[in-house]
Image (spheres, grey):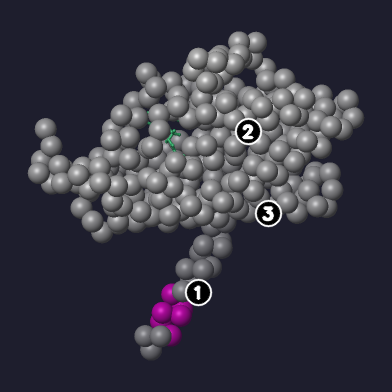
Amino acid sequence: AMTPEEAAFQDRIDRGEKIEPKEWMPEGYRKTLIRQIGQHAHSEIVGQLPEGNWITRAPTLERKQILLAKVQDEAGHGLYLYSAAETLGVSRDELIDLLHAGKMKYSSIFNYPTLTWADMGAVGWLVDGAAIMNQVPLQRTSYGPYSRAMIRICKEESFHQRQGYDIMMKMAKGTPEQKAMAQDALNRFWFPSLMMFGPSDKDSVHSAQSMAWKIKMNTNDELRQKFVDQTVPQAEYLGLTVPDPELKWNEEKGGYDFSEPDWSEFFAVISGNGPCNEERLGARVKAWEDGAWVREGLMAHAAKQDARRAA
Ligand code: ACO
């Protein structure tokens, strides 16, 4: 049963009001937001790695500039989201410590390797496409700072998605070798992209409460279905084949039937045993340690200025 305070809070949510940082909220609401926003921030930061891997090998100067800008955008999204999480009473340092200790998650998708240039296309098209599908509804999420962060982030994500599709177009309409690379990238990224939406609804532990609080706006399976319905015609336009023999238009439901991803693979990846988990976390920890002298320098500078101001 709800306390009167909790009931009043739920009424505000049901009326569509935004909850702002200094206002009363149930501890569970605060914790769930810290978990989700923190995980989202970590995903943006770790998500720089698979693409950062290709900046030095981009095929043209223009492609390199675009990719560089995109990876910088992801860094910005991460910092923006850490700030949103900080309004809930947790510090960025605490969240980063938890990530580095393997105690907080980041999106499963970033534990897969990017093997060819076509993967830059597939990541932009499918991974950012899935990210937008999940984040557009989150613009209406109940927590004010998170919802406002999503508005800006979605604008940039849609540019990312377009640039990925543009790479796929070039590759798919290129030489037979280029088209084969594009198909191979689609083959490898299709099911991992479907996994980004989280486990199937029957296994999603948080969905019911998060939806009641409007922290989440849709179930995992709803968004996965929308993603498939939107993406299959895009694959057809490219002349590529979605690697799912069960994929079939279902007139009655007005959407595609498709195969479930391999959930045992998903659970292995989110518990730290995907193809690149160790490499990704290792790269983050190393970057943090390598940057220690910059943080120390900034702190020393700030202390000096404080002392001067006090004098
Ligand atoms: N990768 C890693 N972990 C996942 C994923 C995934 N793709 N999907 C679900 N999980 C985890 C959940 O965090 C939860 O674990 P926890 O209890 O230890 O935190 C567990 O699996 C059970 O799943 P759910 O109950 O369905 O979890 P939740 O309600 O949080 O839904 C979802 C997961 C849909 C990812 C939600 O958190 C969300 O919408 N997050 C915001 C968007 C986001 O983080 N995007 C990041 C990728 S996009 C990008 O950065 C480019």
Dot in front, 2 or 1 = 2
Give how far across and how far down residue 20 sits, in percent: 30, 56
Q: Which residues are magenta?
A: 303-308
Identify the mark at residue 156; answer none if there is no mark: none
The residue under label 1 is 301
The residue under label 3 is 69
Question: Crowding at label 2, few (<14), some or many (≥20) Cα neighbours within 10 Å?
Answer: many
Which residue is at the front of the view, 54 or 293?
Answer: 54
- Quadrant of the picture in which ligand 1 is shown: top left
User: Mark 2 or 3 closer to N-term?
Assistant: 3
Question: Crowding at label 1, few (<14), some or many (≥20) Cα neighbours within 10 Å?
Answer: few
The stretch drawn in magenta includes residue 305? yes
The residue under label 2 is 126
- What's the magenta bit mostly, secondary-structure-wise? helix
Label 2 and label 3: CA atoms lie apart by 19 Å
Give how far across and how far down residue 131 sits, in percent: 54, 38
User: Mark 2 or 1 closer to N-term?
Assistant: 2
Which residue is at the front of the view, 255 or 307?
Answer: 255
Label 2 and label 1: CA atoms lie apart by 44 Å
Give how far across and how far down residue 219 sits, in percent: 40, 29
